[in-house]
Amino acid sequence: MYWDPALETLSPSQLQELQLARLKETVARAARSPFYRERLAAAGVTPADLHSLEDIRKIPLTAKDDLRARGKEMLTVPMTELVRLHASSGTTGKPTPVGYTARDLETWGELMARVLAAAGLHRGDIVHVAYGYGLFTGGLGFHYGVERLGAAVIPVSGGQTRRQIMLIQDFAPNALCCTPSFALYLAEVGQQMGVNFKDTSLRVGIFGAEPWSEAMRQEIEARLGVDALDIYGLSEIMGPGVGIECLQAKAGLHLFEDHFLPEIIDPVTLERLPPGETGELVITTLTKEAFPLIRYRTRDVTSLDYAPCRCGRSHARMSRIKGRSDDMLIIRGVNVFPSQIESVLVDVPGVSPHYQLIVDREGHLDTLEVAVEVDDTVFSDEVKQLQKLAKTIEGRIKDYLTVSVKVRLVEPRTIPRSEGKAQRVIDRRQQQGGKP
Amino acid sequence: MKVEQISVFLENKAGRLAEVTRCLGEAGINIRALSLADTTDFGILRLIVDKYDAAREMLKAKGFTVGKTEVVAIEVPDNPGGLAQVLATLAQAGINVEYMYAFVQHSGKNAVIIFRFDNLDEAISLLQKAGIHIYQGEEVYKL
């Protein structure tokens, strides 16, 4: 069930040796980019200064803000070397481009093949990919992984739930890849259609792109009759395929340490935390060409377990993502920052910048409600005018973020303000135990 | 010819309507007519009061979102077909009624109905030509 037995089961000392060699290469490569040349020079670090993996601490962290402000200066190859661009969402709503060389895509395909093999998939299997195809890395990431594995891919992308269920019945896939909430939604719609997923050929599901819980795993497994595995990845780093749970243990996600060097830090003091402690995951890419990232703050909160796993893989296991160290929300797999909503609201004449986001879960799908204060300038005595205003705001947010929201108009000064700063987000999903 | 109406934005929350009426009562303002439009999320309270300016300022000071609209108070014969006749006159001229609501009190034998039109001035001149009685604002506040 290994795709790359040699590299997936390296002994700790072999792994560290490989990591150090690749770290030096990465630092040398990164120094070709204006951004890292400047950063490394300021820190006074050259590849020769890296005598052990611990020495990585001499290099400053890279933040999402750096990527947004200076992403183009992080490129280590001429633009002509790029063969694909994906995008990562940012707090401003302006997507940050992430470029790949041909070798980057090959590495990605290789790692996704590892993911699929860890889920027990092999040549001859059929994989239904319902992650979105496009700028989002989910769809294409899985797509090329399945092809690399030598299995057959059904490139369904998102939406059209009933049609997806028909495809699952007709094309008989063995694996389902989508967000965990969409998996449960499929089960629900299937029930309405009289389709029992336990009668389908599905045996395993690889679910990610949003946080989910152990309780949700049990529900998915019971309703779909599959083994449900958690996958991790992020567009800035590569896309899906940074880590995967193994079918044997289902206890933490093996982080592919020969390609990614993980650290856990305290998000406030930025100090490194000892193994096993919970904090923010920081990743250094070890093999990326176009956009290597050194000590990138993922903002995802997790912990690392270095104990051997029963599957035999030696790579450390990270726990399910326990939350975010910033205010990013994940709504139906889409990253949403409150500041993005704010930037839409300030462009609507008369709408005050006081708003509140209420995240909830209806059935198994996330809902986002935006409460907006109505003041004298936009108020009308006619219901239809106010409804039009709400629709306008909903339309603009949908255009900007690709997420459907419901706008609720509320009275002025009713959104609580505490010490001048409003409580922007109420996430009711956490109260239901549906989320970690 | 025009009557000043106050509209108040109300969230669908228990006690909001009670709060508006309580504030008006404490300020010694009498409600002459009212209508409440509601949606799943919010309501719009429309009021004709005896002291328009005082009511508006007081509600604003209390933090309510208050709007001002000009409406028309029309005398409608209190007999079968009375309202239908008025509406037919308007419909023939292509004037749209945004909303309407009845006054609680009668003026003599007839009913008083408040109309909100998309084109107020055109509606007034049409109604006058048709011989339909329109109340002055001052008359309405004191009815």
Image: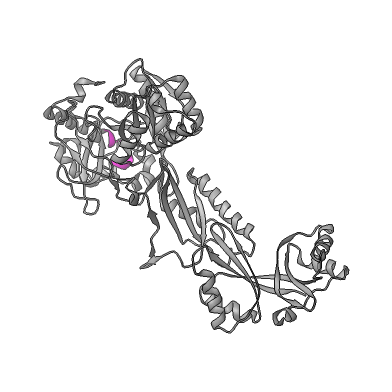
In the image, residue B139 sits, relative to residue A267, either above or below, namely below
- Residue lying furthest bottom: B28
What is the quadrant of the N terminus of chain B in the image? bottom right
Total numbered labels: 0
Q: Is residue A89 left or right of residue B74?
A: left
From the viewer's side, name the closer residue of B40 and B80: B80
In the image, residue A159 sits, relative to residue A327, either above or below, namely above
Q: What coloring was used for the rendering?
A: one colour
From the viewer's side, name the closer residue of A340 and B122: B122
From the viewer's side, name the closer residue of A425 and A349: A425
Q: Position of residue A92 (x, y in %)?
A: 43, 49
The verdict on residue A32 being magenta is yes
Q: Which residues are magenta?
A: A29-36
The verdict on residue A286 being magenta is no
For the question of whether residue A112 can be seen, the reply is yes
What is the quadrant of the C terminus of chain B in the image? bottom right
Q: Position of residue A401 (x, y in %)?
A: 47, 45
In the image, residue A97 sits, relative to residue A194, either above or below, namely below
